[in-house]
Amino acid sequence: MRLSESDRLFRDTLREFLEREVAPDLPEADHEPVSKEQAVAYQRDLGDLGVGPGAGEDASFEDPVTYAVTIEEIARVWPSLVMIITMGFPFPAALVPYAGDRTREALGDRSRAGELVGCLAVTEPAGGSDTTSPATTAERDGDEYVIDGEKTWVSNATIADVALVLATDTDTGARDFFLVDAETTSLESRELDKLGWKGSPTGQLFLDECRIPVENRLLNAVGRMASEGGTNVLENPIFRTQDPQNAMFAYMRTGMASMAVGIMQASFEAALDYTTERTVGGDAIAGKQLVQDHLYEMKAGIETARLLTHHAATHVAEGHADARLLSSLAKGYACETAVDVASRAVQVHGANGLSTDYPVERYLRDARTTTIPDGTTEIQKLIVGSELTGYPAY
């Protein structure tokens, strides 16, 4: 797929910024989760480029193709930064100005300054990939909802000002999303350590009688946002043609696929550079047949995954009936291919590939991590199967 001139210019500008301002801090910046202050600083810096919650508008996240380009470029340098930025946009931080009075008053100043950190809380300890019947509940009590439950593997959990929580509405028995802020409720968190994305804070959320205004129900806030013209993201056809949760996940899974492509690109570039510099018997290993076999497989994987991801992003942008299928197909294929590409990069480096002095061991850990969030590869296969046959398998 050929990018538009504006997307190419934007990509080049973003790459220049990341190479200049973010890359020099690595790998040290990835040794432990960033603080809230650091996350806000990154949001502010990227916001100056029109990226993410610090931009104060949809900017690069408005169009799914530009969104894919943005995520790939950030992931090429630092995948953890993708999670820090995208968990706050377009939901839930963007919903704060359209939430209930109590939430808006508590977070309004930071919202207007683009300094809110958000998170999306879907997964539960006993549920895993099963999001059809959340154990977390939302019970209507007058002009409030009372949220009770526990979430896990939530990116930004420990630094979030506001969480978009998937819960079962006890009145209707249906699942829904609710905006829960950490300022006016009893929301608590605990940090979790993990294999990759070390710079991205991940944790559990504990919701014990968290009382929120009824306006904090997702559809209520989104309705107000749409009526006031608060976001162009919601003008994308997919939010009119598909179930809101499926539309949201189509966006997110296309983003995760783009993240995997960015990791692949970084792995390939590192491996290619190494093969021309490393010599055996006086000759660069780039001239060895089996090394060139690795480079071939890596390049083929990257190009295929990128084309599939951009193809999916285009369908998401159009609100096409196949958007859900293609976003899951791209997510599953790109993330698994990223593991293979990063593993080959390690292999090309030999023993040095196992050393933390080289970035490829980090790329492999980060690539492996992409295969789990937003639905495991196995879940993506079942979604694709269901979309193809009309028979749900889970």
Image: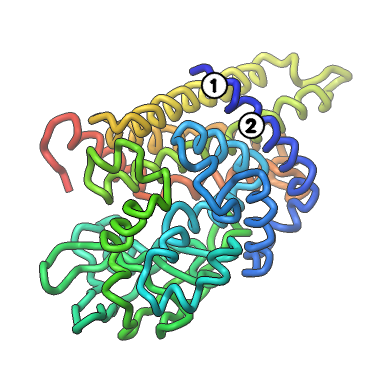
Q: Which amino acid, by three-letter code, is at mark 2?
A: Arg
Residue found at x 28% / y 78%: 147
Q: Which amino acid, by three-letter code, is at mark 1?
A: Leu
Residue found at x 11% / y 67%: 172
**Res 114 → quadrant:** bottom right
10 Å neighbourhood of mark 1: few (<14), some, or many (≥20)?
few
Asked if residue 311 lies left or right of residue 23, the reply is: left
Asked if residue 365 lies left or right of residue 92, the reply is: right
| Position in image of residue 329 (x %, y %) | 34, 33
Q: Are marks 2 and 1 in contact (CB under 8 Å)?
A: yes
Residue 301, relative to residue 154: is it above or below? above
Residue 370, relative to residue 186: is it above or below? above
| Position in image of residue 90 (x %, y %) | 45, 52
| Position in image of residue 258 (x %, y %) | 50, 36
Q: Could you tell me which secondary element the residue under label 2 belongs to?
A: helix
**Res 149 → quadrant:** bottom left
Let me know if residue 196 appears in the view. Answer: no
Asked if residue 53 lies left or right of residue 346, the reply is: left
Q: Which residue has dot 2 on it?
A: 11
**Res 269 → quadrant:** top right
Between 358 and 118, the residue placed more toward the observer is: 118
Residue found at x 31% / y 67%: 178
Q: Which residue has dot 1 on it?
A: 3
Q: Could you tell me which secondary element the residue under label 1 belongs to?
A: loop
Query: What's the distance in space between the residues labelled 2 and 1, CA to CA?
Result: 10 Å
| Position in image of residue 180 (x %, y %) | 38, 73
Residue found at x 72% / y 25%: 272
Which of the two discs, 2 and 1, labels the residue nearer the N terminus? 1
